[in-house]
Amino acid sequence: MMTITVHQPYATLIVMGLKTMETRTWSTHYRGPLLIHASRRPYVVEDHLDNQGNTLTDWLIAWDYHHGPLTFPTQSILGAVNLAGVIPYSKLHDNLHLLSPVDKRYGVFAPGWCAWKLTNAVKFKKPLLVPGKQGLWEQVFDPDILHENGWKGTLTTEWQQSA
């Protein structure tokens, strides 16, 4: 399955369905299921400033209070999404007001960048330890391992989160 490595905490926010746009300086023609891999770099709150210069600390404290503590595993596949499309900044800049607060705060929406539209996020029940790579890369798993972790579907079709 196609895979992309993302730094923490963004990888966790993506598989939770809270971050639905991943901004990159490069585009892809690929569309379909995409595994989300957390990079090996550990998450340090102070290293992750949003585009207003704030850290994620207050947001994470609020999440913990309402939903329980978040964890930020590294060097692991955390879940999967559907890569529904890639939108260049030139087509997005007039509609930034439509983005979610998380996407607005933790994405780069500027000339030369594009936003990968992510849908149908599934957070796996347990992280799958795998070394990462740069760019889009292929990770082969036995489909049973993916299904046991909450993925429902085939390797070629969009899926729904299991109940």
Image (tube, rainbow, N blue to C red):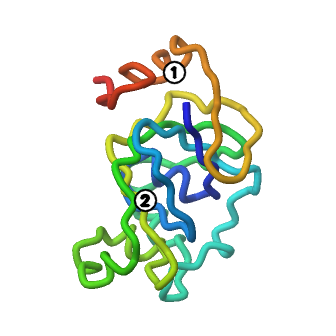
- Mark closer to the observer (2, 1): 2
Residue at screen point 43% across, 76% down: 105
- For disc 2, the neighbor class at 10 Å (few under 14, some 14 to 19, many from 20) is many
Q: Quadrant of residue 26?
A: bottom right
- For disc 1, the neighbor class at 10 Å (few under 14, some 14 to 19, many from 20) is some
Percent x, y of residue 153: 36, 20
Q: Describe the element under mark 1 as helix, strand or loop.
A: helix
Q: Is residue 36 above or below residue 145?
A: below
Nearest the eye: 117 or 17: 117
Q: Amino acid at mark 1?
A: Leu
Q: Is residue 39 above or below residue 127?
A: below
Percent x, y of residue 52: 48, 88
Residue at screen point 52% across, 71% down: 56
Percent x, y of residue 43: 68, 60
Q: Which residue position is annotated with label 1?
A: 146
Q: Describe the element under mark 2 as helix, strand or loop.
A: strand
Q: Which residue position is annotated with label 2?
A: 116
Residue at screen point 53% across, 38% down: 35
Instruction: State which quarter of the image contains the N terminus.
Output: top right
